[in-house]
Image (cartoon, grey):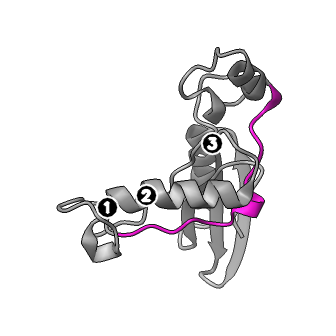
Amino acid sequence: MAKVVNIHLLVNSNKTAQIANRLNDALRNIVSPMGGGSAQGSFVLDYHLADLEGARPASKDVQLAIAKGRYKKGSAFQRRGVRRAYIDHYLLHINEDVEPDLMGAFGSEDAMLKAANCLHESHPDDGMYHMTCPPPAVPG
């Protein structure tokens, strides 16, 4: 089964055209010929660069660490002072399998699951779906 995977990258540029050109050059090298790339036998079949204009800037702490040569791998994707992934959890509740209601953001999967369990007690037949999204974006 094929899967679509989202990846967040920290790039050292603020120029959208430069980012797009350099990422396209790099990604074409790892994509199999099936996806128009050059890497024979690669499990990466294709890629798409999402809205680069909407890319969020790195935090001031991350930018300062880069400027001072002290950037630590992974720190751009963590909330300040918290050692966890930079992601919010949402609960999509489909009331009577008709009316969607987006609940969240929850700061952890455990918090979202607790809300889902409470809601399930009073609405056992409703659809409930776990969604994740990196802030400041909100699923829509």
Point out the stretch of residues depicted in magenta: 46-60
Q: Which residue is mark 3?
A: 11
Q: Which residue of the protein is positioned furthest toward the left in this rendering?
A: 41
Residue at 55 percent of width and 64 percent of height? 129
Residue 80 on image: x %, y %: 74, 25
**x and y, in percent, of residue 52 in the image:** 69, 61
State yes or no: discs 1 and 3 in contact (Cβ < 8 Å). no
Disc 2 packing (10 Å; few <14; some 14–19; many ≥20): some
Query: CA–CA distance between discs 2 and 1?
Result: 9 Å
What residue is disc 2 on? 27
Q: Residue at x 26, y 71 (%)?
A: 33
Residue at disc 3, secondary structure: loop
Residue positioned 59% across, 81% down in the render: 97
The amino acid at mark 2 is Leu
Type of residue at label 3?
Answer: Val
Task: Report the Cα–Cα distance between label 1 and label 3.
Answer: 21 Å
